[in-house]
Image: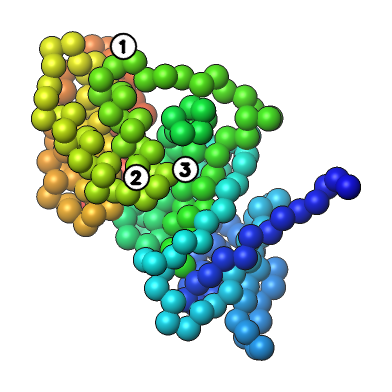
Amino acid sequence: MTNEVTVPLLPCASIDDIETFYGVLGFRTTYKQRKPYACLGVQREDLHLQFFEISGFDPEQSYGSCLVLTADIEGLHRAFAAGMRAAYGKVLVSGTPRMTRPRARKNADGLGGFSVIDPGGNWIRVFRDAATAPMPATTPAGRLAKALANAVVQADSRGSVGQAVRILDSALARPQADDDPVEQVEVLVYRAELAMVLDDPKTAAEMLARAQSVTLTEDESERAAPAFDNAAELAAALR
């Protein structure tokens, strides 16, 4: 048989909170009931998700997760980000719910991905579909790039933000003359993002200021543009 469809069923504390949040991301409600048990279905184009409510459920203790494969992670992220800005005035990068940025994952053959952590604590992990949009796997070459790749695995994939922070802080504490300035900016900006996840705005502001102070050539500034775009988003969220 072909053309089967799998729809994940994920836990939450409130289907109302889930419905509101996914509405922000452009989903429509396809099904909702209160009895005999509370459950909800939402859909955005071909992306279907369903949720069931558990009284007293703690989102911080959730193991709920699913994978979403798409040929256009950047487009989906932009759409989600636009919805968040319209509803909240900013992209949510800390707390629950929140969303990470698209980044290459060395534990996914170098394919890009990002995650949405919804009000139920479920991780909706969006990855580029290699079958429809193959990308060559890349191996980070520089010392800081390797540290960044390892930190992304810990924080964005495993949710181990503390371990990611330790990796980056260790790398930043040992500057070397041949460090790539662009990689330095990328590490500092990501460290700022992790500080915000940990509700540490002081460190986030410090890291963003350090990133802005890195001396770059014109070519390096172009390479660092995505990182500075992220930095601007983070700075706006700090206000």
Tag 3 residue: 114
In the image, residue 28 lies at what x, y percent?
Answer: 64, 64
| Residue kind at label 1, given as amino acid type | Asp
- Disc 2 residue crowd, few under 14, some 14–19, many 20+, Cα 10 Å: some
The earlier-in-sequence mark between 2 and 3 is 3
Residue nearest the viewer, comparing 23 with 43 = 43
| Residue kind at label 2, given as amino acid type | Ala
Tag 2 residue: 155
Residue at 31% x, 37% y: name it.
Answer: 151
Q: Is residue 220 left or right of residue 179?
A: right
* Mark 2 or 3, closer to the camera: 2
> Please, is residue 129 above or below residue 16 in the view?
above
> Please, is residue 105 above or below residue 196 in the view?
above
Residue at 29% x, 48% y: name it.
Answer: 161
Q: CA distance from mark 2 to mark 3?
A: 11 Å
In the image, residue 21 lies at what x, y percent?
Answer: 49, 65
Tag 1 residue: 219
Residue at 55% x, 19% y: name it.
Answer: 136
Asked if residue 208 can be seen in this view, the reply is no
Q: Is residue 101 left or right of residue 41?
A: left
